[in-house]
Image: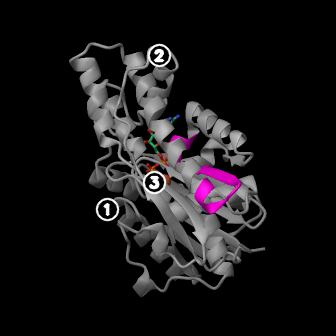
């Protein structure tokens, strides 16, 4: 049995987990909550620095109760990027120290691909079109000839950040997505919002502005604007996902990233997949949002395919794109 310790801390959530081929052995986390406004990278990094020791000790202690001791750990994996520079550096430093002191390999993983691989693992989907939507990212991807190709993406901000920004305007605390979902469920009237899809790319920044104006200048009810915001943004995401599935003739789709927890979005994607006789997959919420298990699991796949990271190549990559990664752990698809 191979066991990996994974550390995640690209943004607001610091998490450590131990994973084997069969299961998640133990996971624990500590979440940074801004007192007001959005996530401040330096404050989040300070949070991670002060919580790291506790989080890692809890993970190791929890694993011990499952019969896994320090010497059973085969490698330590960490999020090398993308993410906030100060947060990435804090976690990478801890991962390097653990790798050196335990004398086990270090594995720098791409956070976006970790979201995808944990979803494939938990859902058992083989070769899906992936809609990866989180705070900072909004991408449609699929695997082809050794890489996850980005077929479409946001041209400005991620859908999660657009939702969070609008939520802050409404005076709601971070993260705003779930609060907007709640308000949207009470909306009844659709108010026109900018629908911006260019080929398979998207834009969300105009939506936040239009939503603010609809409340500020046109005095619409906030429930109706949350509803209209969601209907518009989620239709855009569903449209580009469907286009990718049609172009690539794929009959599976996988949802990844924190925004994927939204039930209305899940419903739209499910309907789209049903209409094209495709299968829709979504993992449990704990594997949609940032989590240490996904980092450990991708670390496991990488270790088993001989893909580790020497210390001198372990510098963090705040803008690390998924299509930069050579996928060493997947077989070529026969099509
Ligand atoms: P990444 O580094 O991949 O961009 P992240 O740091 O943004 O990840 P995630 O946990 O993947 O972290 O996603 C967080 C985002 O998900 C936040 O913007 C939050 O508002 C949003 N979110 C969470 N739950 C919901 C929901 N039910 N509806 C809409 N958005 C949601
Ligand atoms: Fe994430």
Residue 302 in the image: above or below residue 31: below
Helix, strand or loop at mark 2? loop
Tell whether label 1 touches label 2 (CB within 8 Å).
no
Rounded to the nearest angstrom, the CA distance separating label 3 from label 2 is 29 Å
Q: As drawn, is 84 to the left or to the right of 260?
A: left
Tell whether label 3 touches label 1 (CB within 8 Å).
no
Q: Which residue is disc 1 drawn over?
A: 86
Q: Position of residue 269 (x, y in %)?
A: 61, 40
Q: Position of residue 162 (x, y in %)?
A: 35, 39
Q: Nearer the viewer, residue 117 or 195?
A: 195
Q: Quadrant of the C terminus?
A: bottom right
Residue located at (78% from left, 63% from top): 22
Q: Residues within 10 Å of mark 1 (few under 14, many from 20)?
A: many
Q: Which region of the structure is painted magenta?
A: 246-260
Q: Nearer the viewer, mark 2 or mark 1?
A: 2
Can you see residue 103?
A: yes
Reply yes or no: does residue 252 show up in magenta: yes
Q: Nearer the viewer, mark 3 or mark 2?
A: 3
Q: Position of residue 266 (x, y in %)?
A: 61, 37
Q: Residue furthest left?
A: 217
Q: Position of residue 297 (x, y in %)?
A: 64, 65
Q: Which residue is disc 3 drawn over?
A: 200
Q: Where, by quadrant of the figure, is residue 327 drawn?
A: bottom right
Tell whether label 2 touches label 3 (CB within 8 Å).
no
Q: Which residue is disc 2 drawn over?
A: 187
Helix, strand or loop at mark 3? loop
Reply yes or no: does residue 130 show up in magenta: no
Disc nearer the start of the sequence (2/1): 1
Residue located at (38% from left, 58% from top): 49
Rounded to the nearest angstrom, the CA distance separating label 1 from label 3 is 32 Å
Disc nearer the start of the sequence (1/3): 1
């Amino acid at each position: 049995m191979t066991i990996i310790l994974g550390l995640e801390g690209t943004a607001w959530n610091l998490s450590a987990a131990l994973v084997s081929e069969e299961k998640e052995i133990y996971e624990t986390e500590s979440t940074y909550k801004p007192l007001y406004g959005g996530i401040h990278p330096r404050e989040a990094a300070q949070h991670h620095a002060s919580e790291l020791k506790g989080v890692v000790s809890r993970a190791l202690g929890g694993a011990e109760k499952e019969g896994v001791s320090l010497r059973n750990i085969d490698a330590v994996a960490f999020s090398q990027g993308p993410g906030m520079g100060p947060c990435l550096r804090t976690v990478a430093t801890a991962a390097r120290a653990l790798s050196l002191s335990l004398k086990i390999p270090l594995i720098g993983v791409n956070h976006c691909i970790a979201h995808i691989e944990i979803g494939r693992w938990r859902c058992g989907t083989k070769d899906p079109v992936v809609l990866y939507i989180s705070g900072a990212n909004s991408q449609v991807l699929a695997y082809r000839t050794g890489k996850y190709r980005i077929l479409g993406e946001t041209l400005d901000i991620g859908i999660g950040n657009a939702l969070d920004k609008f939520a802050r305007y409404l005076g709601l605390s971070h993260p705003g997505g779930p609060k907007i979902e709640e308000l949207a469920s009470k909306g009844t009237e659709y108010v026109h919002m900018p629908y911006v899809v260019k080929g398979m790319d998207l834009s969300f920044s105009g939506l936040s502005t239009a939503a603010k104006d609809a409340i500020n200048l046109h005095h619409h009810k906030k429930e109706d604007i949350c509803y209209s915001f969601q209907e518009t943004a989620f239709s855009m995401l569903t449209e580009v996902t469907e286009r990718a599935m049609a172009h690539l003739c794929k009959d599976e789709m996988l949802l990844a990233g924190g925004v994927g927890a939204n039930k209305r979005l899940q419903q739209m994607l499910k309907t789209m997949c049903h209409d094209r006789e495709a299968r829709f997959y979504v993992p449990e919420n704990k594997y949609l949002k940032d989590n240490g298990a996904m980092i450990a699991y991708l670390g496991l796949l990488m270790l088993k395919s001989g893909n580790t990271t020497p210390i001198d190549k372990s510098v963090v990559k705040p803008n690390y794109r998924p299509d930069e990664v050579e996928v060493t752990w997947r077989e070529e698809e026969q099509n």
